[in-house]
């Protein structure tokens, strides 16, 4: 199995329409490039469609979509089916009560197999995203058993261990790590070290797209 983790030039434009158009096109291009390189599993970064910065929940609602009937998920499903790849795509999910979640969908053969709502929201997400409250899903696929987490979730050892105990072969983690504290020359930043330690301690592979 070949895994591609896509680093994309995403937009945080204040105009949500401009941001949406840029990021949607960037996601499609990244998926197509990865598939052309022979990838079986393609991982997009955290909020690949939505971007990172939101002034308010109102802004996030402009880009959020439900699990059924949303244009971005429908496009990713179509790409998964036509290109014959699995896609782990992070997006903004809205429910019937207008709660917005920082979610990741796992798509295989054009179908959404599982969705994980980020349970551990970070400071800049407070007031924008509702935390999820479910055990991280593990899905049996043709690429093995895949567990889903989102960014900050993976920093809590007990939470990371949940998909491992459920039989995950690989844990997929879309992230949005800021470079506020770059690692000293020749060293790896702590985010990477923590996930390497989690992978080693739990005997799983980890795929992180920043």
Image: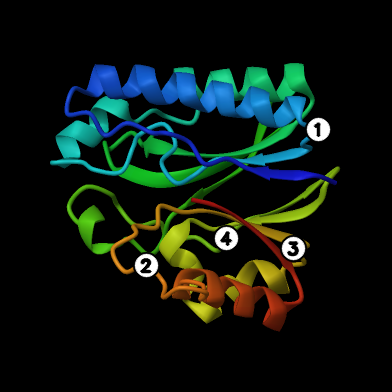
Point out which mark residue 182 bears.
2
Indicate the position of residue 119 as horizontal and vertical percent values.
41, 61
Identify the residue at horizontal 38%, vertical 28% (top origin): 65
The Cα–Cα distance between marks 1 and 2, rounded to whole angstroms, is 32 Å
Disc 1 versus disc 2: nearer the observer:
2
The Cα–Cα distance between marks 2 and 4, rounded to whole angstroms, is 29 Å
Mark 4 or mark 1, which has the lower sequence index?
Answer: 1
The one nearer the camera, 132 or 202, is 202
Residue 133 makes an appearance in the image = no
As drawn, is 149 to the left or to the right of 70?
right
Indicate the position of residue 34 as horizontal and vertical percent values.
69, 32
- Residue 29 lies in quadrant: top right
Q: Secondary structure at mark 3?
A: loop
Disc 4 versus disc 3: nearer the observer:
3
Residue 129 makes an appearance in the image = yes
Q: Which residue is situated farthest in the front direction here?
A: 185
Within-10-Å neighbours for mark 1: few <14, some 14–19, many 20+: few
Point out which mark residue 57 bears.
none
Answer above or below: position of 209 versus 54: below
Q: Secondary structure at mark 4?
A: loop
Identify the residue at horizontal 33%, vertical 37% (top origin): 51
Q: Secondary structure at mark 1?
A: loop
Q: Secondary structure at mark 2?
A: loop
Within-10-Å neighbours for mark 2: few <14, some 14–19, many 20+: few
Answer above or below: position of 105 versus 70: below
Point out which mark residue 136 bears.
4
Q: Give the residue number, with chain letter if any, for mark 3.
A: 168
């Amino acid at each position: 199995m070949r895994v591609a983790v896509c680093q994309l030039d995403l937009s945080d434009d204040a105009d949500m329409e401009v941001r949406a158009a840029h990021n949607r096109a960037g996601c499609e291009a990244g998926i197509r490039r990865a598939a052309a390189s022979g990838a079986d599993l393609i991982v997009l970064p955290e909020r690949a469609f939505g971007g990172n910065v939101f002034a308010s929940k109102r802004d996030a609602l402009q880009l959020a979509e439900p699990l059924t009937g949303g244009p971005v998920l429908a496009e990713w499903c179509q790409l998964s089916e036509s290109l014959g790849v699995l896609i782990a795509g992070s997006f903004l999910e809205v429910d019937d009560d207008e709660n917005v979640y920082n979610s990741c969908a796992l798509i295989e053969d054009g179908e959404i197999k599982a969705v994980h709502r980020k349970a551990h929201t970070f400071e800049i997400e407070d007031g924008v995203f509702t935390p999820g409250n479910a055990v991280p899903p593990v899905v049996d696929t043709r690429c093995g058993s895949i567990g889903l987490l989102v960014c900050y979730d993976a920093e809590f050892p007990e939470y990371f261990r949940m998909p491992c105990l459920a039989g995950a072969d690989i844990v997929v983690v879309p992230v949005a790590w800021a470079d506020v504290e770059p690692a000293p020359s020749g060293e790896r930043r702590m985010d990477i070290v923590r996930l390497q330690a989690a992978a080693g301690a739990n005997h799983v592979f980890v795929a992180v797209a920043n």
